[in-house]
Amino acid sequence: MYAPTAEYANVPLPEIRIMTNRLLSAETTEVVLNAIEGIKHIRQVNMQGESLPAKINSGPAKGHMNNHTERKIIHVAGREVELHCLVGAFYIEVLVEDEDGLNAVVEELKAACDKTIPFGYTIDVGRYSKYRPSLHDYRSA
Amino acid sequence: MAKYQRQFFPGESKPAQNRRRYLDPKIQLKKLRDIPMDDVVRLMGHRTPGQAYGSIHAPIEEATEPECPIRKLVVPIEGAKAGDRIRYIQFADSVYFAPISPYQRAWMYLSRYRGIDTGTLSGRQIIEVRERNLEQIAKELLDNETFDPALTGIRGATVHGHSCRLDEHGLMFDGWQRYLWDDEKKEVMYVKDQVALPLDKKIYVGQPAPMADLKERTTIFRADGYDMNDDKEVVDFYIRIHKLRTLGGYRPFDVKGE
């Protein structure tokens, strides 16, 4: 029988979406992640952006290394994170008890982002990714 | 009867005026930079500078042409005379106030150049022409005001980026990073040719224009720039085209008198 792997599985925890007005360089992404790293109640951070392929994937140069300067390893809280894209959005899932707790986290995130994200950003609260399996997850390959 | 006068685009807003300027072949576009011809050839990557032009047929003068009134009427362009290969250059234009957008590129190319074939896609515009003519056209297009180093990309393949947000230096996104920002010179430099083959030397294409300047130079109507709804003549023009096309498709008998 299927059993959730954790207490919060299948629960739509709130997500805070930070969309940056410009695509961030690897260096800035590292600074932003380190700035929000210490904030409590954050369960996970997902990043989204424009893909940077390791190799040229079509055309006459197919197979050549891409050597994109922003595709590299960054260091977040002592861990290595390999960036595969030019980041343009952060989806931050938070584990909070109530709306006051959520608002407090949002304020802390705003303070961190104001200091680190150049050219501005927008911040929204909602649920932007899947939190439980649906029919799509059971389809055969 | 009054002499026919060619018209280009309606409207009095800035983008409408710019469209008219770019389309009118009698207007000489401003030259903003001078990229050496050898560098233009390197950027396109079809031949090495100094290399002879490849050919796909014998020079027209040497060939025996069939008797044809059209052939007598049409003067061939230099590349066609010599039997050059057909080669291309393709530009991607950012939605963030690039000086020109692909659709107007098509209008401009067809209005200004002979012997070309052009194709419009969502964010890019290809121009195909005989090689030696292409090189001259490409240099013109890179040197004049329709090109901005940050917002126009020379991209033969994988053009993705025209509708992406700009990066921190204000450059249009390119997954293959054909061009980089030189922070010392404050200029954009190409390190790969249009299909992302590495170049032997860096090619500088100049400094991007400030956004305030681009908003005045662009042909793009945008709500945060010049809104198309503020230009009644342009809106009426498009409504009329839309109406005629719809009627033409569904009630062609109603087009009469429109």
Image: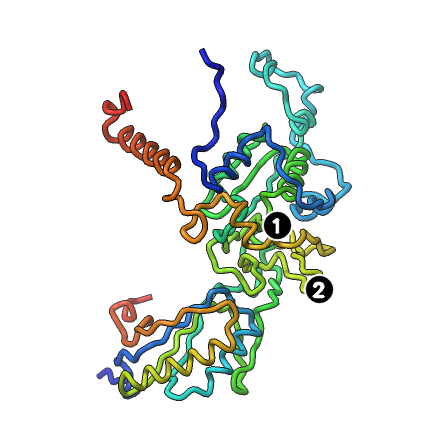
In the displayed structure, would residue B81 be above or below residue A79?
above
The spot of residue B255 in percent (x, y) is 27, 24
The spot of residue B157 in percent (x, y) is 55, 50
The quadrant the C terminus of chain B occupies is top left
Q: Which residue is mark 1?
A: B194
Give the left or right position of residue B193, taking residue A89 as reference: right
Give the left or right position of residue B45, taking residue A6 as reference: right
B153 or B145: nearer the eye?
A: B145
In the displayed structure, would residue A102 be above or below residue A120?
below
In the displayed structure, would residue B220 be above or below residue A71?
above
Quadrant in the rendering for residue A124: bottom left
Rate crowding at label 1 as few (under 14), some (14 to 19) or many (20 or more) other CA atoms within 10 Å: many
The spot of residue A107 in percent (x, y) is 39, 81
Rate crowding at label 2 as few (under 14), some (14 to 19) or many (20 or more) other CA atoms within 10 Å: few
Which structural element holds mark 1? loop
A32 or B28: nearer the eye?
A: B28
Q: Which mark is residue B24?
A: none
Task: Identify the residue at image location x=40%, y=88%.
Answer: A40
Type of the residue with mark 1? Gln
In the displayed structure, would residue B84 be above or below residue B51?
above
Q: Which residue is mark 2?
A: B184
Marks 2 and 1, how far apart at CA = 24 Å
The spot of residue B253 in percent (x, y) is 23, 22
Type of the residue with mark 2? Glu
Task: Identify the residue at image location x=43%, y=49%.
Answer: B222
